[in-house]
Image: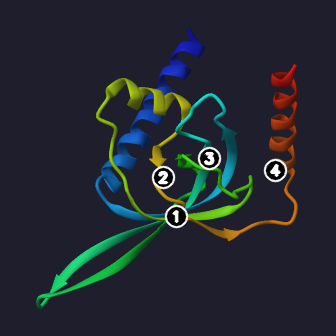
Amino acid sequence: MISFITGNITYKKQQEEFHFFYHKYQNETCSISGIITDIEYMTKHQRIKECITIEVTNIEIENNKTNNNIAEATKEKKTVKKIDPINIQIYSPFTTQCKVSDTIKLEAIIIKRPANASFFSYLIKKNIHASVFLNQNNIVLEKRPNYSFWRWIVNTKYHILKRIQNK
């Protein structure tokens, strides 16, 4: 009974975080920076080659303000708290040069809440706040560490799965 109540409270908290995220960033044009936590190579899909998961470290909202008939764009910088990580999945139709633990930046991303309620529930379950589908390679590499323990783990996992598939 206690585990049911704890699970229900956790799920409600997660739902509130997602609703707050979309309330704050809905239909906003943003630049998003984050650290790559996982890369999945989509071998079964013809149109999508990679699924990159990032943990967002920074979101900048572009505000277009009109002042005396002159449009000026300003960027409002929002640093994301580490208490509640925001995760975004990037689906790419081509192979990128990204690696786990790289810090990357995506510019001119418009955040929209999914219209499909079941897909929204799926995102909550997977703890993915948004999905980005790339048309072109607009990923900017900001930083790549020389060595990363997490990169080694993901590469080892990938090579093991590749060997299993080849058998």
- Residue under label 2, please give it: 134
Q: Which quadrant of the view contains residue 56?
A: bottom right
Assess whether mark 4 and mark 3 are in contact (beta carbons under 8 angstroms): no
Earlier in the chain: of badge 3 and badge 4, it is 3
> Which is more foreground, mark 2 or mark 4?
2
Earlier in the chain: of badge 4 and badge 1, it is 1
- Residue under label 4, please give it: 151
Determine whether 42 is above or below 79 in the image. Answer: above
- Residue under label 1, please give it: 138
Which one is nearer the viewer's eye here, 142 or 162? Answer: 162
| Cα distance in 3D space between marks 3 and 2 | 11 Å
Earlier in the chain: of badge 2 and badge 4, it is 2
Q: Amino acid at mark 1?
A: Asn
The residue sitting at 80% across, 66% down in the picture is 145
| Cα distance in 3D space between marks 1 and 3 | 13 Å
Assess whether mark 2 and mark 1 are in contact (beta carbons under 8 angstroms): yes
Assess whether mark 4 and mark 2 are in contact (beta carbons under 8 angstroms): no
